[in-house]
Amino acid sequence: MPRDDKPTLGIGMVGYAFMGRVHSQAWRSVSAFFDLPVTPTMAALCGRSKERTTAAAADLGWAAVETDWRDLIRRDDVDIVDICTPGDSHAEIAIAALAAGKHVLCEKPLANTVAEAEAMSEAARAAAAKGVYAMVAFNYRRVPAVALARRWVEEGRLGELRHVRAQYLQDWIVDPEFPLVWRLQRDQAGSGALGDIGAHIIDTAEFITGDVIAGVSALTETFVKERPLAEASSGLAGDSRTAERGTVDVDDAALFIGRMRGGALASFEATRFAAGRKNSLRIEINGSKGSLAFDFEAMNELWFHDHTLSGAEAGFRRILVTEPEHPYAAAWWPPGHGLGYEHTFTHEAKDFLEAVAAGVAPSPSFEDGLRVQRVLAAVETSAADESRWTVVS
């Protein structure tokens, strides 16, 4: 129940599948663990099917149901619109919500095209001038170990940055008979592994380093060109494969090198064909004074090498990022009691609510999402042009 001494902010969420479930968990739990200046209430859930949306609302804790996102935006009890839909609908929903005076949290990647992301970013700038804010949901920024890595880079503990290596490795479509879900269709997803998981490592690399990617040279590949159609799809799973097959028109894997504006060399790999890797977001930063390394499959650990020590005692050491002094960790369990994937979304909700309550722009902004979209576009342009070096516009 909302506390009497705190204003409430009503949340309206569009979409109730995988992302909708983790976002619902975040809205349900954030007030229980963080002392917020406002109390979020789960006002309404929106989905196209009244029956399925009603069932999801009952399971996930939403008070009401809508079947048209326009009706959701018009509700007086909705102050924040949380967009958990495929990328092809992000721009329309977000721009309309901002114009209606609703704050917006939008899943990544921000859009399916640079033009859509530009329109969303412009709408967010106009809304911010009126005290209405928008944020793109790059949840891996909210892993305590990643936030700690950012802090140490800002403090200069790595010195001059020289190398960035980032990978996001999954294996959920290795089977050529896995059905043609929406994440494998360009008209809904925009791109394949590149936009779905490559966007995460682009943002994570730029977040930790405080730098941006200046240019890229890229390769992409689609290993399985056709897949069986599915009667129903949630994006990461499909039901009732049919005998009919459809074309996979997105990339299965993307590999590119780049240069950061500050001069560091960078390499990126995003694939959903790394057999045995379930959700391995890896990043290593090498600097003149030390190195950091992280892998989400061991998400409570950060590896640090202090190169200012003598060779007799230097080397990578494991930091268990669960101490109260570590980012976000004080709100949770005793040291050594690790966090999980869902906690990153709770941290995301916390940061967004605090920014909105304070009247300051949350981060990452739609402008940040636009910058990632421009990198994705440069990768596709380079890959289509024999890996030609392509400047990020």
Image (cartoon, rainbow, N blue to C red):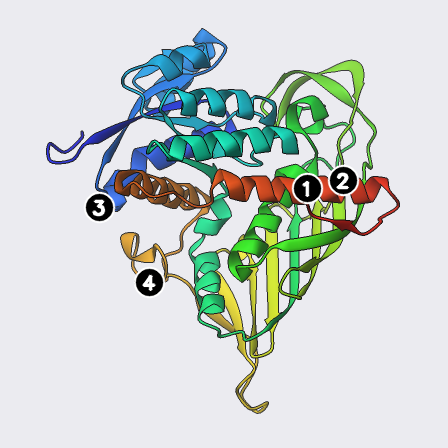
The amino acid type, in three-letter code, at marker 3 is Asp
Helix or strand or loop: what does disc 2 sit on?
helix
Q: Mark 1 = which residue? A: 376
In the rendering, at what x and y percent does residue 299 appear? Answer: 49, 55
- For residue 27, above or below residue 315: above
Helix or strand or loop: what does disc 3 sit on?
loop
Helix or strand or loop: what does disc 4 sit on?
loop
The amino acid type, in three-letter code, at marker 1 is Leu
The amino acid type, in three-letter code, at marker 2 is Glu
Q: Which of pointers 3 and 2 lies earlier in the amino acid sequence?
A: 3
In the rendering, at what x and y percent does residue 104 appear? Answer: 41, 30
Q: Quadrant of residue 329?
A: bottom left
Q: Mark 3 = which residue? A: 35
Number of residues whose C-alpha sits closer than 10 Å to that of mark 4, classed few (under 14), some (14–19) or many (20 or more): few
Instruction: Please name which of the two marks, 3 or 4, marks the residue nearer to the observer.
Output: 3
Residue at image point 45% right, 35% down: 125
Q: CA distance from mark 4 to mark 1?
A: 38 Å
In the rendering, at what x and y percent does residue 135 appear? Answer: 44, 38
Q: Mark 2 = which residue? A: 380
For the view shown, which residue lies furthest in the top direction? 50
* Label 2 close to label 1 by CB (< 8 Å): yes
